[in-house]
């Protein structure tokens, strides 16, 4: 199954995309095969594309007082965007990079807006994707406040079992909001 066909199959689980929408996406999406450490978005630039991960692993980070802080990880089947930058079409604070060989399907902001205007079913697909990621975002925010470090670590491993093979311990620790030493202690106790 091609990366775009795989994406259309994922969309069909949210809401069936009609043939005209499928034709539109065949015409306006682009497939990228990119290496690890490829930067999709630099801090201070505008996110002009939404990416869907067919295969691979990515992370977003920002810099706080000169320290790199991992904001999120994304794996196969996930969406990659800098939310604020993409939806406002203004420069963002995130840097987004790939952590392994990745195959991505992209759609520009302009084509996404056009698809929303032309295809009512794409509005349903977009809303359901947005709901899914909003729920994940809220769960992460609550988890950072309410869960112990070990529980946050276990939740991350449940969500992304391959994270230990794809991200450094420093990146994982910053994502969890803990020091690398605390992460090492948690891993030793497991």
Image (cartoon, rainbow, N blue to C red):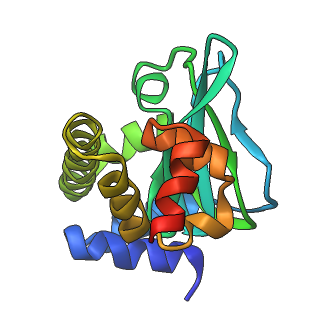
Residue 140 quadrant? top left
**Residue 71 sits above or below residue 149 on the image:** above
In the rendered structure, the answer to whether residue 175 lies left or right of residue 103 reads left
Q: Position of residue 61 (x, y in %)?
A: 59, 33
Q: Position of residue 58 (x, y in %)?
A: 61, 53
Which residue appears at 47% of the width and 79% of the height? 6
Residue 57 quadrant? bottom right
Q: Position of residue 20 (x, y in %)?
A: 35, 66
Q: Position of residue 43 (x, y in %)?
A: 66, 22
**Residue 49 sits above or below residue 2 on the image:** above
- Residue 76 appears in view: yes
Which residue appears at 20% of the width and 58% of the height? 121
Direction bottom: furthest residue: 1
Quadrant position of the N terminus in the picture: bottom right
Q: Nearer the viewer, residue 121 or 2?
A: 2
Quadrant position of the C terminus in the picture: bottom left
- Residue 71 appears in view: no
Which residue appears at 58% of the width and 27% of the height? 94
Q: Nearer the viewer, residue 40 or 117?
A: 40
């Amino acid at each position: 199954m091609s990366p775009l066909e795989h994406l259309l199959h994922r969309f069909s689980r949210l809401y069936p995309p009609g043939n005209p929408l499928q034709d539109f996406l065949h015409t306006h999406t682009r497939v990228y095969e990119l290496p690890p450490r490829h930067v999709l978005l630099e801090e201070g630039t505008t996110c002009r594309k939404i990416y869907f991960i067919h295969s691979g692993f990515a992370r977003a980070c920002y810099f706080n007082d000169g320290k790199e802080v991992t904001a999120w990880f994304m794996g196969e089947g996930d969406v990659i965007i800098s939310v604020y930058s993409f939806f406002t079409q203004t420069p963002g604070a995130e840097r987004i990079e790939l952590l392994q060989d990745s195959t991505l399907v992209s759609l520009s902001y302009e084509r996404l807006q056009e698809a929303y205007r032309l295809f009512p079913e794409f509005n349903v697909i977009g809303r359901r994707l947005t709901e899914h990621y909003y729920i994940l975002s809220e769960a992460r925010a609550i988890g950072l406040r309410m869960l112990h470090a070990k529980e946050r670590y276990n939740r991350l491993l449940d969500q992304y079992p391959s994270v230990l093979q794809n991200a450094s311990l420093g990146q994982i620790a910053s994502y969890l909001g803990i020091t690398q030493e605390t992460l090492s202690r948690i891993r030793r106790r497991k």
